[in-house]
Image (cartoon, rainbow, N blue to C red):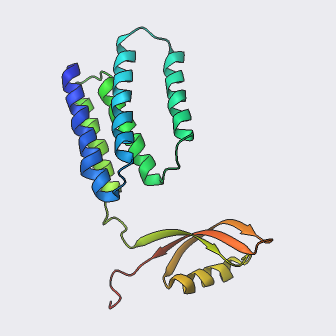
């Protein structure tokens, strides 16, 4: 596939990812330039590296720089990380010549489809997760689960204790629970 067609495939894919999937579902405007920028930058870097004579060290160094940037950025949630790496993958795919020529757009479509399904609002729409700080240090997991159940009024699916502070008498816990679709059922 020609370089201009690969660039067009990438532009279409990243626009669909950012404006068709990510923003309508998550409404986090500050991620738009990050997703677009990382995609286009990686597309340019990959196209340059695949068309010039460079050593492996330079390529690994560039990915190291990307990692440092990521580590020094604000914390991202799991969904933002998924979109971030999807933008990276789309840029990489468009920047590298792959045989057969239809493989690049097919892989891009597969990635977009996976994100469409995996982040669909209806997928496990009754499941929720919260991180709570409780004003008591719970050492008994059964007692903790009962307290969370009464506090939330929901069916508790999983409890993950993050921290128990005996000095300040507190517990930080991530709780996953299920909400009822319709309370009349």
Tell which residue pokes out farthest to the right in this image: 167
Question: Left or right of 10: which side holds 32?
Answer: right
Question: Left or right of 92: which side holds 113?
Answer: left
Q: Looking at the image, which is closer to me, 106 or 65?
A: 65
Q: Looking at the image, which is closer to me, 180 or 106?
A: 180
Q: Looking at the image, which is closer to me, 101 or 143?
A: 143
Compared to residue 77, the image places residue 141 above or below, namely below
Compared to residue 30, the image places residue 67 above or below, namely above
Residue found 28% across the figure and 52% down from its top: 21
Tell which residue pokes out farthest to the bottom in this image: 184
The picture places residue 39, in percent across and down from the top left corner, at 35, 34
Q: Is residue 1 visible?
A: no
The picture places residue 62, in percent across and down from the top left corner, at 50, 24
The picture places residue 177, in percent across and down from the top left corner, at 49, 74
Question: Left or right of 100: which side holds 163?
Answer: right
Residue found 42% across the figure and 41% down from its top: 85
- Position of the C terminus, as image quadrant, is bottom left
Q: Is residue 169 visible?
A: yes
Residue found 56% across the figure and 34% down from its top: 68
Question: Left or right of 47: which side holds 65?
Answer: right
- Position of the N terminus, as image quadrant, is top left
Tell which residue pokes out farthest to the top in this image: 53
Residue found 73% across the figure and 69% down from its top: 164
């Amino acid at each position: 596939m020609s370089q201009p067609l690969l660039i067009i495939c990438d532009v279409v894919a990243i626009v669909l990812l950012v404006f068709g999937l990510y923003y309508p579902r998550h409404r986090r405007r500050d991620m738009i330039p990050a997703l677009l920028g990382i995609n286009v930058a990686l597309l340019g870097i990959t196209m340059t590296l695949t068309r010039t004579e460079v050593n492996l060290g330079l390529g690994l160094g560039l990915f190291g720089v990307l990692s440092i940037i990521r580590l020094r950025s604000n914390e991202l949630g799991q969904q933002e990380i998924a979109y971030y790496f999807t933008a990276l993958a789309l840029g990489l795919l468009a920047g590298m010549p792959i045989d057969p020529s239809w493989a690049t757009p097919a892989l891009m479509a597969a990635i977009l489809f996976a994100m469409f399904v995996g982040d669909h609002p209806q997928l496990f729409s009754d499941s929720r997760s919260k991180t709570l700080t409780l004003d008591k240090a719970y050492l008994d997991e059964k007692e903790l689960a009962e307290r969370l159940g009464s506090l939330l009024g929901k069916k508790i699916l999983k409890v993950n204790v993050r921290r128990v502070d005996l000095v300040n008498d507190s517990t930080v816990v991530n709780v996953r629970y299920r909400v009822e679709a319709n309370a009349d059922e």
